[in-house]
Image (cartoon, grey):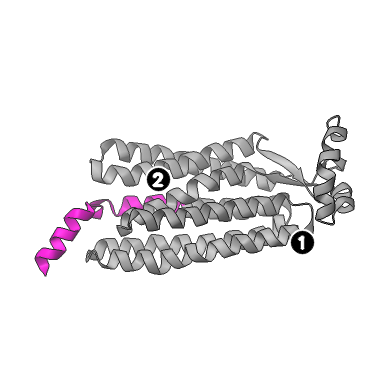
């Protein structure tokens, strides 16, 4: 509260430009007397998420330790995908990593830090399986990171119009990511002529696309319209996180025997020809 007089004179011209100074003041989270916080169901989900991710992280570390250098890179990716998410869930479970947003609603920004790191790592893993080139991989990761930034900015927007513009920007970044995973990466993995890797890619890519498509939908009704309770939002995100990270990681483990080197796969395919 004390810093408000200092901040407002600076912020005023910008909020007036947005035609929103009145709305900004009316909806300012600092004005909240009560905040809609996560309930016992949500806390249960956070606990389950934390445990599932922590166990998967330990398993991935063990797999990485015993694997050869070619397979190890897949397990390293899975270790950090689940490890970073474990940190995020620990923070949320400990009552950290959140703030109040417009509408006096509890908002876990720890989640966005997690996604900003883990979603690119999931794309990297898919790229490794597909044998995708670095430039395409970097472009898809970049689009994905911009999507997370846009969703975060939308979530903390006080002005409704601004919020929905950010949501549209996020969807605009999400579509090329989905296209790349469904088409570009898939076309690349087919050129490897390795049926096991093609099958593995198909499984983990569709798992990722389907799960990731639910994130904007949950966002729409929680951070967006605030129709879902904070607990329901937490439960929904937890289920999606467990499937898109833990299940994803174990699907990689299940294909352990086929995680050979791309170079080896290509030389074999040339021999068959």
The residue under the point 38% across, 40% down is 59
Image location of residue 122, percent across then percent down: 43, 52
The residue under the point 57% across, 56% down is 147
Q: Does residue 21 belong to the magenta stretch?
A: no
The label shown at residue 214 is none
* C-alpha separation, residue under disc 1 versus residue under disc 2: 38 Å
Residue at the far top: name it. Answer: 2
Image location of residue 50, percent across then percent down: 54, 41
> Badge 2 is on which residue?
78
Q: Can residue 28 be spotted in the picture?
A: no
Quarter of the image where the N terminus is located:
top right
> Badge 1 is on which residue?
161
Q: Which residues are magenta?
A: 245-273
Q: Can residue 197 be spotted in the picture?
A: yes
Q: Does residue 266 belong to the magenta stretch?
A: yes
Nearest to the observer: residue 44 or residue 37:
37
Residue at the far left: name it. Answer: 271
Sooner in the amino-acid sequence: mark 1 or mark 2: 2
- Which numbered disc, 1 or 2, marks the residue closer to the eye? 1
Q: Is residue 53 above or below residue 209?
A: above
Nearest to the observer: residue 76 or residue 61:
76
Q: Is residue 240 above or below residue 34?
A: below
The residue under the point 54% across, 47% down is 116
Side of 162 relative to 2 (left or right)? left
Q: Is residue 167 above or below residue 65?
A: below
């Amino acid at each position: 509260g004390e810093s408000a007089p200092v901040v407002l004179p600076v912020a005023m011209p910008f909020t007036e430009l947005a035609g929103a100074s009145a709305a900004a003041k009316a909806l300012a989270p600092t004005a909240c007397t009560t905040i809609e916080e996560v309930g016992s169901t949500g806390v249960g989900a956070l606990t389950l998420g934390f445990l599932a991710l922590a166990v998967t992280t330990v398993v991935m570390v063990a797999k990485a330790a015993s694997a050869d250098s070619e397979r190890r890179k897949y397990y390293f990716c899975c270790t950090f995908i689940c490890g970073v998410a474990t940190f995020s869930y620990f923070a949320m479970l400990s009552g950290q990593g959140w703030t109040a947003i417009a509408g006096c609603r509890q908002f876990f920004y720890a989640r966005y830090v997690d996604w900003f790191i883990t979603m690119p790592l999931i794309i990297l893993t898919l790229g490794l399986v597909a044998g995708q080139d670095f430039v395409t991989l970097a472009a898809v990761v970049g689009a994905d990171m911009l999507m997370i930034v846009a969703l975060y900015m939308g979530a903390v927007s006080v002005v409704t119009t601004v919020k929905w513009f950010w949501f549209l920007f996020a969807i605009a970044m999400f579509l090329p990511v989905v296209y790349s995973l469904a088409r570009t990466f898939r076309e690349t993995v087919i050129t490897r002529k390795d049926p096991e890797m093609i099958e593995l890619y198909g499984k983990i890519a569709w798992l990722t696309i389907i799960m990731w498509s639910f994130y904007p939908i949950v966002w729409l009704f929680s951070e967006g319209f605030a129709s879902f309770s904070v607990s329901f939002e937490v439960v929904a995100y937890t289920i999606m996180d467990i499937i898109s990270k833990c299940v994803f990681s174990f699907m990689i483990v299940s294909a352990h025997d086929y995680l050979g080197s791309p170079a080896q796969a290509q030389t074999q395919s040339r021999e068959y020809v």
